[in-house]
Structure formats: structure tokens, C-alpha cells
Amino acid sequence: MHGQILAQIYTEAGVPAGVFNVVNGPGMVGAYMASHPDIAKVSFTGQVSTGKTVAGLAAGEMKYVTMELGGKSPCIIFEDADLENAVDGAMMANFYSTGQVCTNGTRVFVPEKRKAAFEKRLLEKMAFVRTGNVMDMNTNLGPLVSKVHHDKVMKYIWHGIETDKAKLIYGGLGKPETIPQGCEDGYWAKPTIFTDCTDDMKIVQEEIFGPVMSILYYKKVDEVVQRANNTSLGLAAGVFTKDLNLAHTVTTKLEAGIIWVNTWGESPAEMSVGGWKSSGLGVENGRRGIEAWVRNKSTLIDMNGE
């Protein structure tokens, strides 16, 4: 829908036909475009496995590629962090857009000493989550995008409860109890919080792409940095602390292409963003993002001759 609407806007604005095109179709259409010799650049946003396939097809024709893929990003709360801001950041990192954001900080690391205070304030603030029609400005949690995706998220929540044996402190299976009249047919999922999680749990290791937060506890800074980096993905990370020196020290060690300090998700147009590891290739936005869409040409003219 976004592409169709953008095409309509461009047409109404007078952009010549053929400058911007929308081609709809299944995966085979995308594969054809990615490997077609007349297409010089391929940019893809989506899950890691599909991105690797698209990049492989493009590489066969030596195309330029930009890949913005999945993540399992760490959100690290330090002992000195402002509790209100840290809880707000963790909620934004997990429940914005019903968790359907690739940069979500779904691994929330909290110091053991702040376990009780963090969980208490988090549960208090969950009362302000309001399900409803996403066109209503009072709504801050909408449904999932499709039945297929809804069923996938439910399987992860079930796995977290029954197999991982994580401690469920909010949400779980089923629909939210506060769905407004007229919105009942949406693919709803409860915002869900697991705590006492461990690094080897499936819900901690794999991207769920839904409103599911996993809280993990740690004792030392070096420990949490090592655990935060213990993933094949490296799209984003966040740090909450009042100590700017600590923030600088930790951000230089985190293996992620996008890092926020005392906030989550802000990406101004001038800020280049892209993933490390299996989370992508290249960057979007900023000057470097623009340069990814042009080809360099170097020309030298010898003016010494007659």
C-alpha cells in the first residue's frame, strides 16, 4: 500500500511516467528483478534468510546491494539509569508498531540490583497501553499485519511459556481484553513480557517481530557487553545511563550498526543507519546512504602536452 500511495503522489506531482515504478508479485518476481542485468542496484528490507537469497542473486550480476535485515537487539539498562526513562525506552523498543520493527530491542538487560524496581514500574506503565484502531490518535497498540504472522508470534509465546520456561509476568496467549468494538477481527496479540530469561532460550535468540519482551539480568558491565554481542545479528543496540563516559566505552564495544543512548528508535534523515553481521550490508539515509545509489567515476586529464 505504501508504494502504491507514493506512486499516486508522484504522479499527481508531475513526475514523468517510468521514473518511479511499482511492481507487485510473489517471490519469483523479486528474484527476476534482483538478477535482471538491466537493474543496476538492489535494496532490500526484510528477514535475514530472504535478504541472503536476494543478495546472492544480485551478486551473480555484480550489482550494488543494500540490505537492511533482521535484528535481535540488546537494550542495556545500567545501575545509574533514570528508571522512568529506562522503562519508557524498553517499552518503546518492544511495543512500538506492535513489535513489528526490525530494530526492536527485545533483549532487555537489567542489573540484578534493579530487578524489583524495574519490573514494578514496567508493569505499572503497561496499564497505559491502549489497543484500538491505528487511525485513532489515542491508540498506541494495533494488531499484527496478517494471520500467518499472528500464528508465528503465538507459537513463540507458547514456546516461551511451555519449552523455555521463562517467567511470564504480563500478557501471554490470546487477545487483549480491551479491544474496542469494530476492531475485533484484527490479528491481535497481547503485549507480552517474560522475565528471568537466559541467553539460550529460543525467545531470546530468534527475532519474533511481535510485542514480546525478554528481560535478562546481569551483574557486571563486561558480562553484559559480551552477552549483548553473543548473536549472529547486529542491527541496533541501546544503552541507558547517566554516565556519558560509560556510554562511550560500551557503545564502542557493542557490535551493532545503530546505537542509541538514553532513547530508542530515533533516526533523523541525516543519520546513516545499517546493520552489522547478518543484519545487513551498506547503509540507508544520510550522505553515505545517498552515495550508495550513485556510481563513482574518476577522470584524469594530462594537460602537459601540446
Image (cartoon, helix red, strand yellow):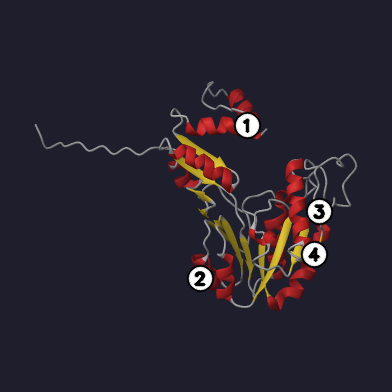
**From the viewer's perspective, is 118 left or right of 257?**
right
Q: Position of residue 220 (x, y in %)?
A: 60, 77
The numbered mark at residue 168 is 4
Report helix, strand or loop for mark 3: loop
Neighbours of disc 3 within 10 Å: few (<14), some (14-19), many (20+): many
The numbered mark at residue 26 is 1
Between the C-alphas of marks 3 and 2, the distance is 36 Å
Dot 3 amino acid type? Lys
Nearer to me, 233 or 124: 233
Q: Position of residue 133 (x, y in %)?
A: 81, 42
Q: Quadrant of the N terminus?
A: top right
Question: Which is nearer the N-term, disc 1 or disc 4?
Answer: 1
Q: Is residue 273 visible?
A: no
Between marks 1 and 3 in the image, the one whose residue lies nearer the viewer = 1
Q: Is residue 270 visible?
A: yes
Q: Residue at x 62, y 50 (%)?
A: 102
Q: Residue at x 80, y 48 (%)?
A: 139
The numbered mark at residue 190 is 3
Residue 173: quarter of image? bottom right
Q: Residue at x 79, y 61 (%)?
A: 162
Q: How many marks?
A: 4
Q: Which residue is mark 2?
A: 249
Question: Which is nearer the N-term, disc 3 or disc 2?
Answer: 3
Question: Which is nearer the N-term, disc 1 or disc 3?
Answer: 1
Between the C-alphas of marks 2 and 1, the distance is 45 Å
Question: Which is nearer the N-term, disc 4 or disc 2?
Answer: 4
Question: Which is nearer the N-term, disc 4 or disc 3?
Answer: 4
In the image as oriented, which residue stretches furthest toward the right? 181
